[in-house]
Image (cartoon, rainbow, N blue to C red):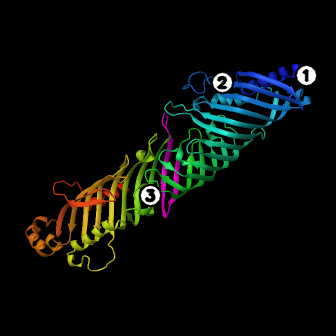
Amino acid sequence: MIDHSEPILRKRVVETLSARFKSRVELAELHVWIADGINAEGKGLQIYGATDPNPWKPGVQPLISVAEFRFQTSLRDLFLQPMRVDTVFVRGFTMNIPPKNDRREMARMRKRNGKLRIIVSKFLFSDAQIVINSVNPQKAPLEFDINDLRLDETGSGLPLRFDATLINPKPTGNIHSTGRFGPLNEASPRDSAVIGDYRFTDADLGTIRGLGGILSSEGHYSGTLGRIEVEGDTDTPNFRIAISGHPVPLHTEFHAIVDGTDGDTYLDPVRARVLQSSFTASGKIVRMKNAHGRDIDLHVVLDQARIQDLLTLGVKTEPPIMSGQVRMTCHLRLPPGTEDVADRLRLAGNFQIPNASFENAKLQKRIDDLSLRSQGKVKQIGKISEPSVTSDLQGVFKLASGTLSFSLLHFQIPGTHADMTGKYSLDGNIFDFHGKLKMEAKLSHMTTGWKSLLLKPVDPFFHKDGAGAEIPFKVTGTRSEPHFGLDFGHESSAKPSSELHHTRLTAKD
């Protein structure tokens, strides 16, 4: 019986697949044994097409390859035409989908004109992979690694039901998805329907250099393979950026359009919340060939946010140097690479903090004293207890290589406003600002006694543009230990505040 059944099954497997796909089929091994019916196990199954599905890879690649498969049938079914098999177990399955210009061949392969010698009710896959190749040699193939996959045959012209478990490479985590796919639109695979639900758990953001935290997400998707609409949310209770190391809760809700044929994703919008701050983002995430990761390009708007939350997330200094509500619009770019996120992150935009206060007591005391002096209220310094003054900050900035640069920075407190330029590093080691202070009081009115008398002759030299005094200044040192001083030797490039407002509007637009 074994001697007769093994060649019969081998011939039926090869003939069925050759007829089904109209292609050359190779089967390295097939073994048959009797135990509660006929059992068959095959190895080294490969189905080739007329062309190489991945011409960028050395050698000719099969369209479908299977490391091992096995199934069982009864002795009676062995001699039926066609033979029916309930379940085929497959390990090491790879489907190599050609670039879209060559996918007509797959449509030709799917036509059911040939005689089928075996009919299977369902397939159970382990260690499967789907590779979607691109016609663009600059774009790497899109690869999906699937731990476990179940496909149920539902009849000709009907969608396949699937239940899949995937391992996401970055961030590393588990994805479980159930749904329906198809029927395949052979003329245009991008227009094939897909619908389902997913759960993404235990995603370790630490596998992305510069980030940390464990992310979970769930949602629903539907549409076509070329335009999959995804709605879902994510929770990361301990999200952190390595440069600061401060864990914060991060929650997002998103709507995205995913091109399932190349992996490009378009976000519109993402609503996120960090601590007590919220913001929205829209943009795209695009795969790049020969690059680690994806190119992220987003437009971000913060309209209900606190500066202390942003500083907690992104700056190492603790506690945050400043608190207050902030409004900000910026362009965010995160190119692919192996460096830390903080080193790759690029920002450009504008912001306003209308009522900022400084958590550093020494710095806030200097601000309070400056406000009194600039109003000519020198005698009140240290003699009365008044609430600390708040500062109005607004500016235009860029972030690159871990350093935040301000082309325009406007600072205003009662009695004083300043226009300056400068930069500081996110690690807190660089703090370098230069600008001009314009104060209501004259220099001689900002001090008392003999110092006031000595300053009276120089009052006219600092009396400019209607201000009581205009003084060049600098702030250097570090964020935790700032140093203030006069800056007569520095040519400030700060622009008037009217220019600042004009630039803010332009940047925002």
- Up-down relation of residue 220 to residue 412 (above or below): above
Looking at marks 3 and 2 on the same chain, the residue that comes earlier in the sequence is marked by 2
**Disc 3 and disc 2: Cα gap in Å?**
49 Å
- Residue at numbered disc 3: 301
Secondary structure of the residue carrying tag 1 is loop
Judge from the rendering whether residue 108 lies leftward or rightward of residue 113; answer left or right: left
Q: Nearer the viewer, residue 481 or 43?
A: 481
Question: Between disc 3 and disc 1, whose residue precedes?
Answer: 1
Left or right? Give the position of 80 relative to 96.
Answer: right
Q: Residues within 10 Å of mark 3 (few under 14, many from 20)?
A: many
Q: Quadrant of residue 451?
A: bottom left
Residue drawn where x is 44% and y is 54% of the image: 244
Q: Which residues are magenta?
A: 266-292
Asked which quadrant contains residue 154, the reply is: top right
Assess disc 2: are there few (<14), some (14-19) or many (≥20) residues with their C-alpha within 10 Å of its C-alpha.
many
* Image x and y of residue 22, in percent: 72, 24
Residue that badge 1 annotates? 1
Pointers 3 and 2 in contact (CB under 8 A)?
no
Q: Is residue 203 magenta?
A: no
> At label 1, which amino acid type do we have?
Met
Dominant SS type (magenta):
strand
Q: CA distance from mark 3 to mark 1?
A: 73 Å
Disc 2 marks a residue whose amino acid type is Gly
The residue that appears at 24% across and 78% down in the rendered structure is 380
Q: Is residue 399 visible?
A: yes
Relative image position of residue 129 (x, y in whole percent): 65, 35
Residue drawn at x 26%, y 62% is 497
Determine which residue is flagged by label 2: 49
Looking at the rendered image, the disc whose residue lies closer to the viewer, 1 or 2, is 1
The x and y percentages for residue 192 are 65, 41
Q: Secondary structure at mark 2?
A: loop
126 vs 297: above or below:
above
